[in-house]
């Protein structure tokens, strides 16, 4: 099996068996974003306490790339400081520009590295990450 096949399997695994899909019933920070180009939509919910992303969930509709990226992102940011979550978002942006980035324990994210060969799909992959940035910005403004 070559690397592209492995990456495709990882993406489809997150798409068919999403991690952290769902919503919180209580008072979590809620961010809604969409990609009007392709119709992808995401609602991201974050529980941030004392500068730590305690939990993250998402709901949405979209292509396998956008929904897999959301699944991977929520796994990667849970338990991280807000600063580290933003660092991961910055690293993901670099990955989408074709740069080599090490995600450490969250190597599933690297499966999306091939997306940079398809510029129209980059917005799909970055949708959840942009929602994360927006949510953290809103959280910081309310302090």
Image: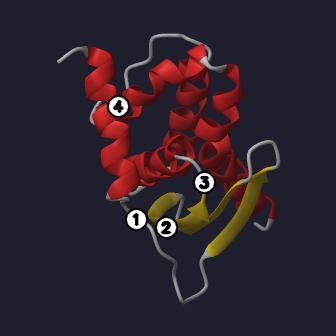
Give the CA separation, mark 2 to mark 3.
16 Å
Which residue was labeled with disc 1?
A: 20
Which residue was labeled with disc 4?
A: 8
For the residues bearing labels 2 and 1, Cβ distance under 8 angstroms: yes
Query: Would you call the spot at circle 2 few (<14 residues within 10 Å), some (14-19), or many (20 or more)?
Result: many
Where, by quadrant of the figure, is residue 28 drawn?
Answer: bottom right
Mark 3 secondary-structure assignment: loop
Upstream in sequence: badge 4 or badge 3:
4
Labelled disc at residue 62: 3
Labelled disc at residue 57: 2
Front one among 38 and 75: 38
Image location (x, y in percent) of residue 85: 52, 44
Mark 2 secondary-structure assignment: strand
Q: Is residue 19 left or right of residue 101?
A: left
Image location (x, y in percent) of residue 95: 53, 20
Mark 1 secondary-structure assignment: loop
């Amino acid at each position: 099996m070559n690397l592209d096949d492995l990456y495709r399997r990882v993406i489809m695994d997150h798409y068919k068996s999403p991690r952290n899909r769902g919503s919180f019933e209580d008072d979590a920070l809620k961010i809604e974003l969409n990609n009007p180009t392709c119709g992808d939509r995401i609602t991201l919910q974050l529980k941030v306490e004392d500068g730590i992303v305690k939990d993250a969930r998402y709901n949405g509709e979209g292509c396998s790339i956008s929904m897999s990226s959301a699944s991977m992102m929520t796994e990667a940011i849970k338990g991280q400081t807000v600063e580290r979550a933003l660092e991961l978002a910055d690293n993901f942006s670099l990955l989408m520009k074709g740069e080599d980035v090490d995600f450490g324990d969250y190597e599933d994210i690297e499966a999306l590295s091939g997306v940079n060969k398809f510029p129209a799909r980059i917005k799909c992959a970055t949708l959840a990450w942009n929602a994360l940035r927006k949510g953290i910005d809103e959280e910081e403004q309310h302090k």
